[in-house]
Image (cartoon, grey):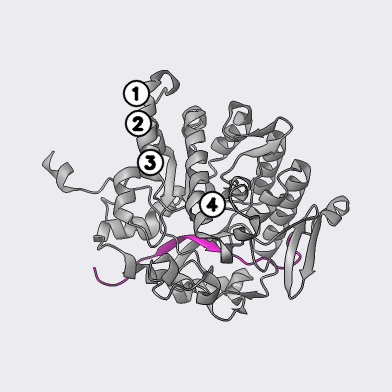
């Protein structure tokens, strides 16, 4: 198959650009001074509790990098040695499709995309910057969820599935937020893959004390996305080199090397090792925009640990991963490698539109595909995301609900 097929695509990774009032329109007055947009020369920055962050270069999104502007960097084709800022060229006005659902529907039709998961862009910055103040964090997240509901809806025309956020700093607060988004029609939710700071200090949200929350999630049948975020390891890297290097557009090679994708590996490792996915086997968890290079080392380590401390694993941890975890690999990665580890039905397509590190056109992925057959194409480009969401698959082949026939399985 040499070109993108004409099948219904489900893009598991796309984003909105929030309006300047998204964080504050519904923020209670008592917290208003804690969230400020500040001017630093020609640049606008977001300050949370007096802490200015430049992780996102322009949090108002009035001017943004063009979709796919960094494609050559992530494809490993930066032969001129350009920085991300040099590579992106002149900033553009945020596309209308990133600002409201009606224009996004028109853009989806133009792109040939049937459905999409639509993530906020500011959420990870907020949770990182406000982490030391759990009460403030939950207040901002609730305000953003209310704005998202009003501005985008949570399931617009059953094609744009915007993802409200749940912050797990406080178990009862997470349960209240879950109930709020369910009451308002959410079909999927977003959780930052990182430890949280609550009344008991820093800890994993996969520890047994969070079981009431995860039980509610399982009972609701709500899928959960763990999307790449501002890395919790920032403070660790700041001890090695100046923190000024953490701006996404100017990150140093050392920071890229050290950060890697440690946070998603640790988060999923915690869900497995701390037993959440065994206590709640019905959970559906997706890793999005975290790549897939972390999977083989994690599998290696889990396999090794089961030999050393089998008493800690009531189930084979690799079987748990394959049962509960979906993965959306980077477009520059290998789909076949992920299929071989996590399984044929757990690998989802994501373009990262409209971010500069994504693809300018979702179907442009086909340039990087490795010759997938017809069945894998249907599964990867749409039906596996529908499986994650609990929606009917679209492949008309009556055998599509079963594992694909391979040379090995045919021989058996």
Residue at horizontal 52 percent and vertical 50 percent from the top: 259
Cα–Cα span, label 1 and label 4 = 31 Å
Residue 274, above or below 330: above
Mark 3: secondary structure: helix
State the residue position of label 3.
297
Q: Find the distance from the CA under tag 2 to the CA under tag 3.
A: 10 Å
Of pointers 2 and 3, the one earlier in the residue sequence: 3
Q: Secondary structure at mark 4?
A: strand
Q: Which comes before the other along the chain, label 3 or label 1?
A: 3
Q: Which residue is mark 4?
A: 227
Front residue of this view, candidates 243 and 110: 243
In-image side of 399 versus 329 (left or right):
left
Q: Is residue 396 visible?
A: no
Contact? badges 2 and 1 (CB < 8 Å): yes
Residue range (magenta): 1-22
* Image-quadrant location for residue 173: top right
């Amino acid at each position: 198959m040499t070109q993108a097929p004409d099948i219904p695509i489900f893009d598991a990774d796309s984003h909105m650009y929030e309006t300047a009032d998204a964080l504050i329109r519904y923020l209670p007055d008592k917290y208003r001074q804690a969230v400020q947009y500040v001017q630093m020369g020609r640049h606008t920055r977001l300050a949370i509790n007096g802490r200015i962050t430049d992780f996102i270069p322009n949090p108002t999104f009035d001017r943004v990098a063009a979709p796919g502007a960094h494609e050559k960097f992530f494809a490993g084709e930066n032969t001129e040695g350009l920085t991300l800022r040099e590579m992106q060229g002149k900033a553009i006005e945020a596309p209308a499709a990133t600002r409201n659902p009606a224009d996004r529907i028109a853009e989806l039709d133009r792109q040939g995309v049937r459905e999409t998961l639509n993530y906020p862009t500011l959420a990870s910055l907020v949770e990182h910057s406000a982490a030391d103040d759990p009460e403030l964090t939950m207040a901002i997240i609730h305000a953003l969820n209310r704005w998202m509901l009003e501005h985008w809806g949570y399931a617009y025309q059953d094609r744009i599935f915007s993802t409200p956020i749940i912050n797990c700093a406080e178990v009862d607060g997470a349960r209240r937020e879950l109930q709020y988004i369910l009451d308002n029609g959410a079909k999927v939710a977003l959780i930052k893959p990182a430890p949280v700071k609550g009344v008991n200090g820093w800890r994993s949200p996969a520890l047994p004390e969070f079981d009431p929350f995860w039980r509610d999630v399982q009972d609701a049948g709500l899928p959960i996305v763990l999307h790449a975020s501002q890395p919790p390891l920032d403070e660790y890297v700041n001890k090695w080199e100046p923190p000024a290097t953490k701006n996404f557009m100017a990150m140093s090679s050392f920071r890229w090397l050290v950060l890697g994708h440690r946070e998603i590996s640790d988060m999923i490792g915690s869900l497995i090792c701390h037993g959440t996915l065994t206590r709640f086997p019905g959970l559906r968890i997706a890793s999005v925009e975290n790549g897939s290079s972390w999977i083989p080392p994690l599998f290696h380590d889990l396999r090794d640990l089961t030999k050393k401390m089998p008493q800690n694993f009531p189930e084979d941890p690799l079987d748990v991963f394959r049962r509960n975890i979906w993965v959306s690999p980077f477009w520059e990665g290998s789909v076949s490698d992920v299929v071989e580890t996590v399984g044929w039905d757990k690998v989802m397509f994501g373009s990262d539109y409209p971010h500069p590190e994504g693809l300018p056109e979702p179907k442009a992925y086909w340039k990087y595909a490795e010759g997938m057959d017809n069945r894998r194409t249907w599964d990867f480009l749409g039906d596996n995301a529908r499986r994650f969401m609990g929606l009917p698959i679209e492949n008309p082949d009556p055998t599509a609900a079963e594992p694909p026939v391979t040379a090995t399985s045919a021989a058996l």
